[in-house]
Image (spheres, rainbow, N blue to C red):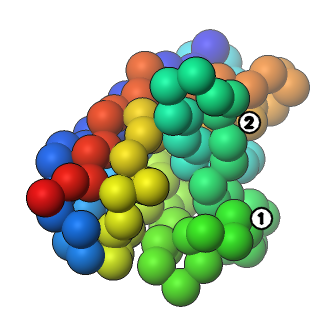
Amino acid sequence: QVQLVESGGGLVQPGGSLTLSCEASTSGVSIYRMGWYRRVPGTQRDLVASLGDGGSTWYRDSAKGRFTISGDNAKGTVYLQMNALKPEDTAVYFCGARASNGQYYFGQGTQVTVSS
């Protein structure tokens, strides 16, 4: 079992920055991949960035050059530094983790609102 807890969301003006944090607690499994997703009401949850083996990273096009994912999959920690935020980045952001039991887990989410 994996439990994920996100923090760091909030209200920020366009052009501002936020850092999201996620910490995992595990029981009987290990984590080998973590990532950040977001969902706008009425749409599906989309992958924003992921952290893979050896520190490899992936970003959706809209996040490239503005967002940075970091962390340690083995320790169950992942962060998302978000710069130059835009109103279209407004969403609920979720931490996700792939565990050794083959299951994928999500946290409860944290709201990010970009507005003046």
Amino acid type, residue under disc 2 in the picture? Arg
Task: Identify the residue at image location x=77%, y=64%.
Answer: 53
In the image, 57: left or right of 37? right
Dot 1 surroundings within 10 Å: few (below 14), some, or many (20 or more)? Answer: few
The residue depicted at 86 percent of the width and 25 percent of the height is: 102
Who's the residue at 30% across and 44% down the image? 112
The correct choice, above or below, for 75 with respect to 98 in the image is below
Q: Position of residue 57 (x, y in %)?
A: 69, 71
Residue 92 visible (yes or no)? yes
Residue 67 versus residue 76 in the image, above or below: below
Residue drawn at (69%, 71%), measured in percent from left and top?
61
Tell me the residue that label 2 is attached to: 98
Can residue 26 be seen in the rendering of this structure? no
**The one of 29 and 10 positioned closer to us in this rendering:** 10
In the image, farthest residue toward the bottom = 65
Locate the N terminus and report the quarter of the image it occupies.
Answer: top right
Which residue, given by chain and number where applicable, does mark 1 sit on? Answer: 53
Classed neighbour count for the residue bearing mark 2: other residues with Cα under 10 Å, few (<14), some (14–19), many (≥20): some
Q: Residue 41 at what x, y percent from top left? A: 50, 25
Front-most of residues 62 and 32: 62
Q: Position of residue 55 (x, y in %)?
A: 67, 73
* SS at badge 1: helix
| Vertical placement of residue 57 versus 46, above or below | below
Q: Residue 85 in the image: x percent, y percent?
A: 34, 68
Question: With respect to residue 62, does 50 lie above or below?
Answer: above
In this rendering, would 36 be left or right of 58? left
* Label 2: element kind: strand
Dot 1 or dot 2: first in sequence order is 1
